[in-house]
Amino acid sequence: MNPPDLKYTETHEWVRLSGDTATIGITDHAAHALSDLVYLGLPKKGDKVSAGKACGEIESVKAVSDINSPVDGEVLEVNSALADSLGDITSDPYGKGWLVKIRIKGKAPASLMDASAYDKLVAETA
Amino acid sequence: MTTATLRKTPLTALHEAAGARLVDFAGFLMPVQYEGILEEAKRVRTKAGTFDLCHMGRCRITGARREEAAQFLVHVNIEKMRFGQIRYTFFCRDDGTTMDDVLVYRDTDEMFFCINAGNRARDIAWMKEVSAKFGCTFEDLSDELAMIAIQGPRSADTMAPLCSGDLRGLKYYWFYRGTVCGVPAMISRTGYTGEDGFEIYFAEREAPAIWKAMLESGKPHGVTPIGLAARDTLRLEAGMALYGHELDDTTNPVEAGLIVGALPHAKDFSGRKAIEAMLAKGPPRKLVGFTTASARVPRQGYALHLPNGGAQVGVVCSGSPSPTLGTHIGTAYVQSAHAGATTLDMDIRGQRHAVKLQPLPFYQRAR
């Protein structure tokens, strides 16, 4: 089950909204589907990001995937600790595995899903 | 495609119960990984593992002129093969391009072939056509025969208690007919990992019992099931071609370095003229191996450039982290003029990553 206090995208990112700050990561489902992570490419502090557009890349032994920003905004902080511990993304995707914090510009898109809608999406793709 | 439309093997339920991740592979629902690609690859190098290969194609040609028919299909000299011997070879078109890479088995009363899952339909159509031309009978046994492999240094220890005959005395690329768990089987000392091991063919309905017996017998030796992802990493380390990557509809086996020198026989076979012409003239591009210290994994289709912003001279066929070498490895086709280079740059979305060319294979077991 995915945490009920987060929002989710169809491309398997999660977002924690707090004031005008959004913390984003990839979901447990995505992390386990990728498995064996080898590379993480994150935006830099100050980079502008757009909702639904790639803002980074995550690579496993078998595939490269885009990380899409769930919101419009500017990168406040990146989780640089992950560089030496990509395993945190798999073992603790909603905690130590967070990827970037973004200062939201405007409003978070209405298309973001709540946990029950996302659970359903995952159940359908499984 | 949803999983409901995919074909299953007699072992699919066992893979599912063991917690394997199942994916579409050539229209079959196949286990891509169990515990993790890198762990599984290491297990095969140090202990052994079992592989469900029921998706591959298995067929035979019988009849008085079966060896003539087989000779027309492949580049090796069938007459020179001993009964019980196996050769790695190719089905080629007239223009020398590769339809498939296959194993051919010469037995006293039949020619047997193991072919790739993804090419089954067209291989079978081609073999039927050739068989008919020589008045032979072609049989597709893919659905009635199961195929399981065991690969790794503990393979013989695992299989010897289950098999009749002199399993340990069987030479690499030879086979015999005997039994596994009392079931009639063809036992072949072949594989696709660079390790010692066996590929075993027997009646499809016996597959779950034999799979379980192999894992049980292998338990003290550390044997577990291995998914297709680790198999791909292992074959790449061993420098073995994968159809759709190093070989495809545009590739002549000479470019892949899989036929070298001159053909040592005068037998006619499909593609002979084009293969001889390329052997005489030299291939325009060559398959090379490379390693990279980059964090990024080489992937099929990435361009290879001359260093310092130079022109593109090649393209990546396969890539993987190599748990055995501890670095990422790959294969690529490079224009022959540049195939002797020591370093090239790999382009990943506009960023250049240095690669170091090296001869294949990356890994060879001690014998």
Image (spheres, coloured by chain):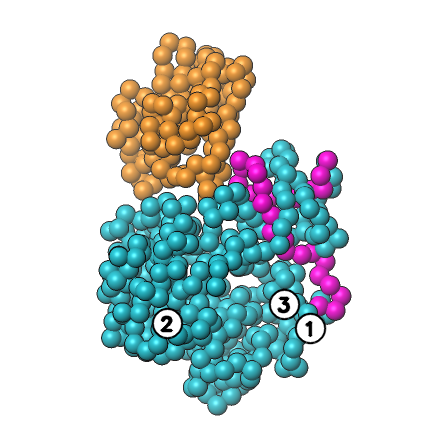
Residue indicated by mark 3: B259
Q: Is residue B366 above or below residue B296?
A: below
The residues tagged by marks 2 and 1 sit, at their Cα atoms, a distance apart of 34 Å
**Left or right of residue B98: residue A90:** left
Q: Residues within 10 Å of mark 3 (few under 14, many from 20)?
A: some
Q: Is residue B239 above or below residue B281?
A: above
**Residue B78 shows in the view:** yes
The residues tagged by marks 3 and 1 sit, at their Cα atoms, a distance apart of 8 Å
- Secondary structure beneath dot 1 equals loop
Please give the letter of the chain rendered in cyan: B
**Residue A110 shows in the view:** no
Q: Which amino acid, mark 2?
A: Arg
Q: Which amino acid, mark 3?
A: Ile
Look at the image and give the residue range highlighted in magenta: B279-308
Q: Residue at x 73, y 35 (%)?
A: B308
Where residue B349 sits: x, y (%)?
Answer: 60, 35
Q: Are marks 3 and 2 on the same chain?
A: yes
Q: Is residue B302 magenta?
A: yes
Q: Residue at x 28, y 47 (%)?
A: B19
Residue indicated by mark 1: B262
- Secondary structure beneath dot 3 equals loop
**Left or right of residue B127: residue B44:** left
Q: Residue at x 39, y 78 (%)?
A: B176
Q: Chain of mark 1?
A: B
Q: Which amino acid, mark 1?
A: Ala
Image disc number at residue B168: 2
Q: Chain of mark 3?
A: B
